[in-house]
Image: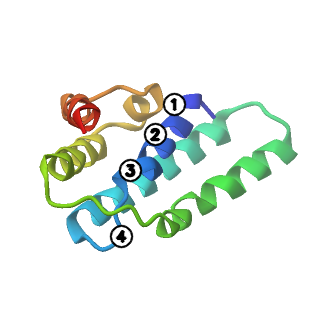
Amino acid sequence: MKKSAAMLFGLMVSGLSVAGDNNLEQASTQLCSKIQACAQADVAKQKIPDDLREALTSMLGQMCANLDSYDTAIPDTALYHAASACLESMNQQSCQQLLNGDKTPECEQYEAVANQQ
C-alpha cells in the first residue's frame, strides 16, 4: 500500500471527521469507503507475502469503522465549510489521484484556513 493512502486516512481522522453533523459526517464516511476500496485494490495488486496482505486487508477493513470513535466537533465556521469542501472534492478524485496524494484546491484552502486557527 502506498504511504499516501495512510496519509489520507490520517488527515481524515485528525480533524475532518465529525460525529453529529450529517453533511460533513456523510462526506467523511463516503471518502473513507472510497479510500478503503482504492487501498484494498492497490494491496491486491502488490507482490507481498500472504500474511502481510492479510494483515493489511484486515486493517483496511476496520478503518472506516474506527471513524466512529473520533468525536471532533467543528462548529459552523470557515474551517467547517473548508473541511466540507475538501472532503467533497476528494470524493470526486479517482483512486489514482487519491493514492498519489494529489491535493485539490479545496483541500489547499482547508489547510490555509486550518493554519490560521
User: Could you tell me which residue is drawn at 20 percent across and 52 percent down?
Assistant: 80
**Distance in Å between CA atoms under marks 4 and 2:** 18 Å
User: Could you tell me which residue is drawn at 79 percent across and 34 percent down?
Assistant: 48
**Distance in Å between CA atoms under marks 3 and 2:** 12 Å
Q: Mark 2 is on which residue type?
A: Leu
Q: Mark 3 is on which residue type?
A: Gly
**Distance in Å between CA atoms under marks 3 and 1:** 17 Å
Give the structural element (helix, strand or loop) at label 4: loop
Q: Mark 1 is on which residue type?
A: Ser
Q: Which mark is residue 19?
A: 4
Give the structural element (helix, strand or loop) at label 1: helix
Residue 116 or residue 3, whichever sits in front: 116
Would you say 13 lies left or right of 44 here?
left
Residue 11: x, y in percent?
Answer: 43, 42
Q: Which residue position holds label 3? A: 15
Q: Quadrant of the C terminus?
A: top left
Q: Which mark is residue 8?
A: 2
Residue 39: x, y in percent?
Answer: 55, 43
Q: Which residue position holds label 1? A: 4
